[in-house]
Amino acid sequence: MPSPATAILLCNLGTPDAPTAPALRRYLAQFLSDPRVVEIPRAAWLPILHGIILRTRPAQSAAKYQTIWTPDGSPLAVWTNKQAVMLRGWLGEAGAQVQVLPAMRYGRPAIGAQLQALQAEGVKRVLVLPLYPQYSGTTTASVVDDVAAWTRRQRHFPELRFVNDYHDDPGYVASLAASVRAHWQREGGPADKLVMSFHGIPERNVRLGDPYADQCRTTARLLAEALGLAPEQYQLTFQSRFGKARWLEPYTEPTLVALAQAGTRRVDVMCPGFTGDCLETLEEINQEARHAFLQAGGQEFRYIPCLNDSHAWITALSRIAQRHLAGWPDM
Ligand SMILES: C=CC1=C(C)c2cc3[nH]c(cc4nc(cc5[nH]c(cc1n2)c(C)c5CCC(=O)O)C(CCC(=O)O)=C4C)c(C)c3C=C
Ligand SMILES: [Fe+2]
Ligand SMILES: [Fe+2]
């Protein structure tokens, strides 16, 4: 059978090739020299990046990756690859003949290399679908920049469409709600509080017009409504602060410590902005934040896994894709 003329590029952040300092240095150098991620002027930032950060952080981060690495590689890559395979299967069952390739903004497989492979196969149309439900200039726009860096080098490129966000998509919210209900069923009921931790960004980006914070708040509200939670039963927080500037607040770990100190005994903790488990969820939340909560007097820290390969999520993702593929031939 000839390969389909339409493809989806399922884009994620990317991850190092190995949990080692040299692999982390390559990955972090690419990530942190993206002007979408660090907006400090190049002339000031690059000496700090190469002279300070890339001398110390690679070894520290490698040690963290070692604690979550699997026999099949980095969890972020494992889940992204599995989601791509499942999405293709789901769309095929729905009668849409599409190729689905995973692609990473940093590291491999690179977005440009995957677009080149699709072009070589004769693909005529590509839907770029980032695995970020909430739009941010730091993530979604950076994927678009990378696609544009490839089109700039092509004389003739496929027709392109981009998904900006799906933070309020009913299927996405329902799949999150289903994951929480399944967790409550396993645990015998809800904890005292549900903490929804999203990746942070600098507060300045939001002041300058990045819609990310609003979209996180909307996702959290819709999820709470789907679960029938009153405002005092859940809390939205932001994690993974990087650097000294002010980031979106409240910060996840200090909030968990404050909750424990104020007498909250049991927490359910989830990361709705991450569609697959990765370093930020498995290490920063399920190891570091857990430790901080228990050290501060909390009794039980119950981590709720990301959507990963849940059927409700792949169904939601295939519906999001189908909506954006509508009107193209063979859909
Ligand atoms: C989900 C959305 C994400 C946003 C928004 C985001 C912004 C952002 N991140 C950094 C710095 C780092 N992030 C790192 C890891 C990382 N970040 C995301 C997602 C978002 N980042 C994911 C999925 C991951 C995990 C990757 C994995 O391999 O599992 C890291 C690397 C790890 C480390 O050394 O700590 C850095 C650095 C900034 C500066 C930023 C916004 C400005
Ligand atoms: Fe990040
Ligand atoms: Fe982190």
Image (spheres, rainbow, N blue to C red):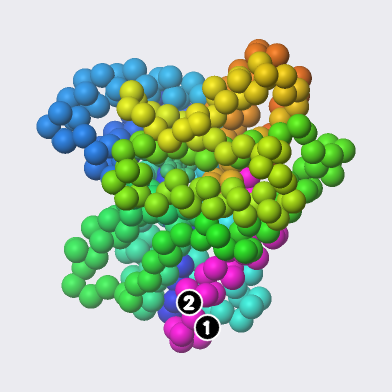
Amino acid type at image mark 1: Met
Which residue is identified by label 1? 331
Q: Position of residue 279 (x, y in %)?
A: 52, 34
Q: Position of residue 238 (x, y in %)?
A: 50, 35
x 71%, y 27%: residue: 301
The furthest residue to the left: 43
x 33%, y 54%: residue: 141
x 62%, y 55%: residue: 222
Secondary structure at badge 1 equals loop
Q: Position of residue 156 (x, y in %)?
A: 23, 75
Q: Which residues are magenta?
A: 306-331
Q: Is residue 283 visible?
A: no
**Mark seen at residue 12:** none
- Report the side of 238 relative to 45 (left or right): right
Query: Decide: marks 1, 2 in contact (CB < 8 A)?
Result: yes
Q: Does the magenta portion include 2?
A: no
From the viewer's side, name the closer residue of 90 and 259: 259
Which residue is identified by label 2? 325
**10 Å crowding of disc 1: few (<14), some (14-19), many (20+):** some
- Where residue 270 sits, quadrant-wise, is top right
- Mark 1 CB in 8 Å range of ligand 1? no
- Where residue 317 sits, quadrant-wise, is bottom right
Amino acid type at image mark 2: Leu
**10 Å crowding of disc 2: few (<14), some (14-19), many (20+):** many
Q: What is the distance, in whole Å, between disc 1 and disc 2 at their CAs?
A: 7 Å
From the viewer's side, name the closer residue of 236 and 17: 236
From the viewer's side, name the closer residue of 10 and 268: 268
